[in-house]
Image (cartoon, helix red, strand yellow):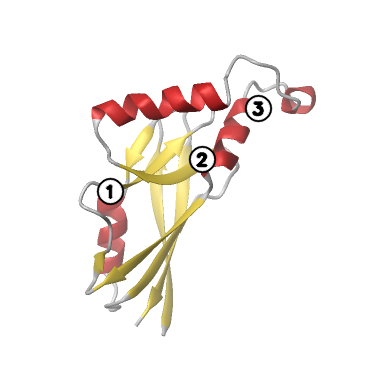
Amino acid sequence: MSVLTKNLSLSTKGELDMIDITDSVAKAVKETELRSGIVAVFVPGSTGALTTIEYEPGLLKDFPDMLERIAPKNIYYEHEKRWHDGNGHSHVRASLIGPSLTIPFKDKRLTLGTWQQVVFIELDTRSRSRELVLQIIGE
């Protein structure tokens, strides 16, 4: 059993930028000597999130619309009392989606469904440089 750690650098355009990172994660796995195992993808920080979706125009519109229904941008958040930075909704949304994913791989290939892509979602109100952590565990 081996554990390897890699980083994936991203530059985002700001709030609700959705970036398909499937190929980057798959490449990181293929570059290892590991044939089967799991890759854990993690975003340090409290305003970025990871999920899987079908990365197509309809869902790229539906997903932000869903977030607005669940955690609206233009309501009051207690977070504003402390920081006054206008991103209370960003923190709530990120915590709902989550900061990590674990994806099995076999024969150096991610075991994703046909229409399933790994997506990073920027939820902060400004553009960011992100450094995702990939921990690849296997044999």
Crowding around mark 2 (Cα neighbors within 10 Å: few <14, some 14 to 19, many 20+) is many
Work out which quarter of the rendered image holds the C terminus and state it. Answer: bottom left
Q: Nearer the viewer, residue 137 or 61?
A: 61
Q: Position of residue 91 (x, y in %)?
A: 62, 34
Numbered mark located on residue 116 in the image: 1
Q: Reading the chain from its start, which is encountered first: label 1 or label 3? A: 3
Numbered mark located on residue 34 in the image: none
Instruction: Give the residue type at disc 1.
Output: Gln
Residue at figure coordinates x 29%, y 73% from the top left: 32
In three-dimensional space, the C-alpha distance between marks 3 and 2, rounded to whole angstroms, equals: 13 Å
Crowding around mark 1 (Cα neighbors within 10 Å: few <14, some 14 to 19, many 20+) is some
| Residue 17 seen anywhere in this rendered image of the structure | yes
Question: For the residue labelled by badge 2, is the local secondary structure a helix, a strand or a loop?
Answer: strand
Circles 3 and 2 in contact, beta carbons < 8 Å? no
Q: Picture quarter containing residue 26?
A: bottom left
Q: Reading the chain from its start, which is encountered first: label 3 or label 2? A: 2
| 125 to the left or right of 51 | right
| 80 to the left or right of 24 | right
Q: Reading the chain from its start, which is encountered first: label 1 or label 2? A: 2
In the image, residue 64 sits, relative to residue 50, either above or below, namely above
Question: For the residue labelled by badge 3, is the local secondary structure a helix, a strand or a loop?
Answer: helix
Q: Which residue is mark 2?
A: 48
Work out which quarter of the rendered image holds the N terminus and state it. Answer: bottom left
Residue at figure coordinates x 39%, y 65% from the top left: 39
Q: Which residue ends up furthest to the top in the rendered image? A: 74
Instruction: Give the residue type at disc 2.
Output: Gly
